[in-house]
Amino acid sequence: MLYVIVGAGPAGVVAAEQLRKLDPLGNVTLIGDEPEAPYSRMAIPYYLTDKIEEQGTHLRKQSGHYDAHTIDVVQDRVVSIDTSINEVHLASGDKRRYDKLLLATGSSPAVPPIPGIELAGVHNCWTLEDARAIVKLAKPGASVVLMGAGFIGCIVLEALALRDVKLTVVEMENRMVPRMMNETSGNMIKRWCEEKGVAVHTSTRAESIEQSGSGLVVKLSNGENVAADLVISATGVKPNMQFAADSGIETDQGILVNHFLQTSDEDIYAAGDVCQGKDFSTGEFTVQAIQPTAVEHARVAASNMARGHHSEHAGNVNMNVLDTIGLVSASFGSWMGTEGGDSVELVNEPAFKYLSLQFEDDVLIGASSLGLTQHVGVLRGLIQSRTRLGDWKEKLKEDPLRIMEAYLACAQGQSTSMT
C-alpha cells in the first residue's frame, strides 16, 4: 500500500507513525514544504525566549527517527493532485503515486490589506524562518508593534514581553482574544497586559506602515503613530487548501470530510487546520485550528486509511488554553452558550479571576475561565462526558467555584444527594 501524507506538522507526523504501526509493510511518504525537520509551530515562542534551541522545536528529537520507522520525508511542495490516476505533482517536477492520500497541509497567516505590509521589518511569526528574523530585531529595548491579539497573537505577545521589548498591541475587536473570551474577560486580559507595561489598543486597526529612517511608523485608526523597529502581523490564519480545491475535492471553510475524515474523493483524507471536521459540542462541521484536534484527526484518518472505515470521528471539543504574561485563560466547547440555554458568571476584576459556565438543561456545554487553572481539567471533562448535573446545576449557579465538587459528586452518581 502506498500512503502519501502532505504536510509535515503534528498531524502529518502522527499520521505517518500511526500508518507505520498499523501497516508495517506499507510505503509511507511524508511531504513538507519547509527546509526544516518536521517541527511544531507551538514551540516557536520557546525558541524566541531562548528556552530552547532550534532543535527543540522538532517534533521528534531523536536522530534518525524517520529512517528508523521507514518513513520517507520529502522536502518539496505539492502543487496539484491528479485524482484520476492517484498522483500528486510536486514543485520540483517530481510525482508521487498513492493508494491513500492524507491532506494535512495546515494553514498560513492571513495577510491584512495594509499599505506597507510588504516592507522589510514586517514579519509574520509562523515559521522558523520568521522566528530567526524576529530574534535578530527584537532586542531588549526595541520598539515592536504586534498587529492582532487573538490566540496566536497573544502567544507571540508572551514571547515578546519576555524579550524585554517596548511592545504595542493593536487589535480590531473590542477586546483581546475575542474568539475565546467575552468582553468582560477579554478586557481583563487587556488591563493585565497594560499593568505589565504593554500598550494595548483595542477597537483599533493599523491603517498603514511607512518607512521612517532606519525604522518604521505604524499609523493607527485612532490617530496615533507608533514608531517601530519591528512589526509583527498575527491577524489570523487561513487553511492551505487551494491546490485541493483546484483538484476537484470539495471545500468550504476547509476541506470537507465525512465522519471518517474522508473527503469527496474516497482515496483522500484530511486532518488538522485544513480539515472541516466535526465539532463535538455542536455536531456541525467546522475548522478547529488547534493542535489537539490536529493530532486526533491524524490518528482517526490514519486508522481509516490503513484499515478502511472502522474509526468514526466523534468530534473534538473546541478548546483553548492560553498563558498571557502569567495570566492563564481557557475556553471550552460552546463557551458563548446557546439560544435558550442557561448560564452563570463569576467576576473578580481586582484579582483577575473570572469563570463563566454555560448550560443546556442540566448539562454543562461550555465554559471560560481566567486566573483559575485548577478547574481546567474538570471543565473539559464535564463538557466532553455530557454529564447530567441534576441538582448540582442550581448549586453551581449559586457558586460556580464548586465545580470540582459537582464533578466528583456526579461522577459517583450522587448528584441528587450532596448538599
Image (cartoon, rainbow, N blue to C red):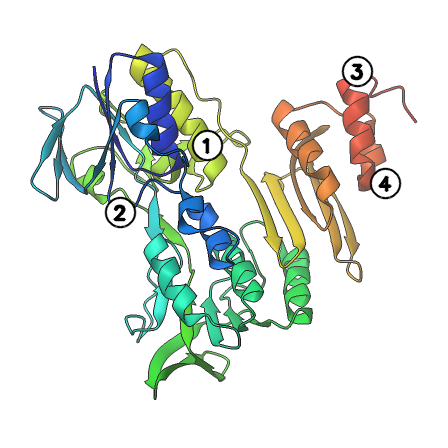
Q: Earlier in the sequence, mark 3 or mark 1?
A: 1
Name the residue tied to disc 2: 34
Q: Residues within 10 Å of mark 3 (few under 14, many from 20)?
A: few
Quadrant location, the C terminus: top right
Element under label 3? loop
Residue at x 48%, y 22% (from the top left corner)? 314
Left or right side of 80 for 197: right
Q: CA distance from mark 2 to mark 4?
A: 53 Å
The reply to whether callout 1 and callout 2 are in contact (CB within 8 Å) is no
- Distance from the alpha carbon under mark 3 to that under mark 2: 52 Å
Marks 1 and 2, how far apart at CA:
33 Å
Label 2 residue SS: loop
Q: Is residue 21 above or below residue 337?
A: above
Q: Where is residue 352 drawn, in percent x and y?
A: 75, 58
Q: Mark 4 highlights which residue?
A: 398
| Residue at the left extreme, as displayed | 93
Query: In the image, residue 206 lies at what x, y percent?
Result: 42, 74
* Local secondary structure at mark 1: loop
Asked which quadrant contains residue 106, the reply is top left
What's the mark number on residue 284? 1
Query: Residue 413 at x, y = what percent?
Result: 79, 15
Q: Is label 3 in contact with label 1 (beta carbons under 8 Å)?
A: no
Nearer the observer, disc 3 or disc 2?
A: 2
Type of amino acid under label 1: Glu
In this view, the mark in front (3 or 4): 3
Residue 238 position in % (x across, y down): 34, 49
Q: Are marks 3 and 4 in contact (CB under 8 Å)?
A: no
* Residue in view at x 64 percent, y 23 percent: 385
Q: For the residue labelled by badge 4, is the local secondary structure a helix, a strand or a loop? A: helix
Which is more N-terminal, label 2 or label 3? 2
Assess whether mark 2 and mark 3 are in contact (beta carbons under 8 angstroms). Answer: no
